[in-house]
Image (spheres, rainbow, N blue to C red):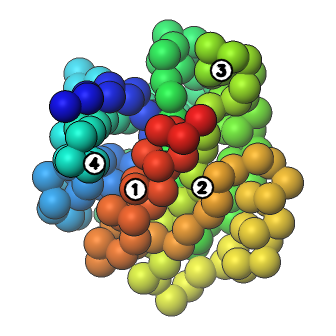
Amino acid sequence: MDEHLLKILIIGDGNVGKSSFLHRYVKGQFNKTYKMTMGVDYAVKLLHWSDKEKVRLQLWDIAGQERFISMNRVYYKGALGCVLMFDVTSSASFLSCRHWKRDLDNKAMLPNGDSIPCILLANKCDLPQRVVPPDSIDKFSKANGFITWMEVSVKENKNIGEAMRRLVQKILSV
Ligand code: GDP
């Protein structure tokens, strides 16, 4: 049995749903008042990927440091994949994705020098007051080298597992 250890980053502006995402994905819960403490660096999830492979995901939440936008290199070190999240009801959080992706590409690289696989997640798609149109997301995703983008709702548990499967699949194939 092969076991892969994958460090995955979760980045994006504050309040877009990163901590909720981690909690939902790792624990299967959505808790409105849940907020990860600064002291917790990461959570771990074990996936039985195939008959021959296990995948241990080490998920790093930036837990309150997002106001700096530019992250410490230590945070990016050794990362093999990334989730960049924004909130479809906040155009500011979508506009920030440009900076987040640039920071990621500058600081996180695979051993061969390529940028690490990153999936763009449009969260809170359960809310009616969305302001970021799918066309804009699609254009941005294609122009900036994302694996793909997906609409998700951490609240309604929509597309969370599927998004992570796509990311892991890509990481294992590069
Ligand atoms: P973070 O600062 O990026 O870690 O964001 P949080 O996980 O703390 O979430 C910010 C707020 O958005 C919280 O009040 C969450 O309950 C809420 N939230 C997160 N995901 C969703 C979602 O999919 N739908 C809705 N309606 N609210 C969400």
Q: CA distance from mark 2 to mark 1?
A: 13 Å
Q: Are marks 2 and 1 in contact (CB under 8 Å)?
A: no
Q: Quadrant of ligand 1?
A: bottom left
Q: To which residue does mark 2 refer?
A: 120
Number of marks in the rendered image:
4
Instruction: Give neighbour class at mark 2: few <14, some 14-19, many 20+ (Cα, 10 Å).
Output: many
Q: To which residue does mark 4 refer?
A: 49
Q: Are marks 1 and 4 in contact (CB under 8 Å)?
A: no
Q: CA distance from mark 3 to mark 1?
A: 21 Å
Is residue 31 at all visible to an observer of this figure? no
Determine the residue positioned at 60% across, 55% down: 120
Q: CA distance from mark 1 to mark 4?
A: 9 Å
- Residue 77 screen position, x and y as percent: 51, 14
Is residue 67 at all visible to an observer of this figure? yes
Asked if residue 86 lies left or right of residue 10, the reply is right
User: As shown in the figure, which amino acid type bears the numbered disc 1?
Assistant: Arg
Instruction: Give neighbour class at mark 1: few <14, some 14-19, many 20+ (Cα, 10 Å).
Output: some
Asked if residue 136 lies left or right of residue 12, the reply is right
Q: To which residue does mark 1 refer?
A: 165
Q: Quadrant of the N terminus?
A: top left
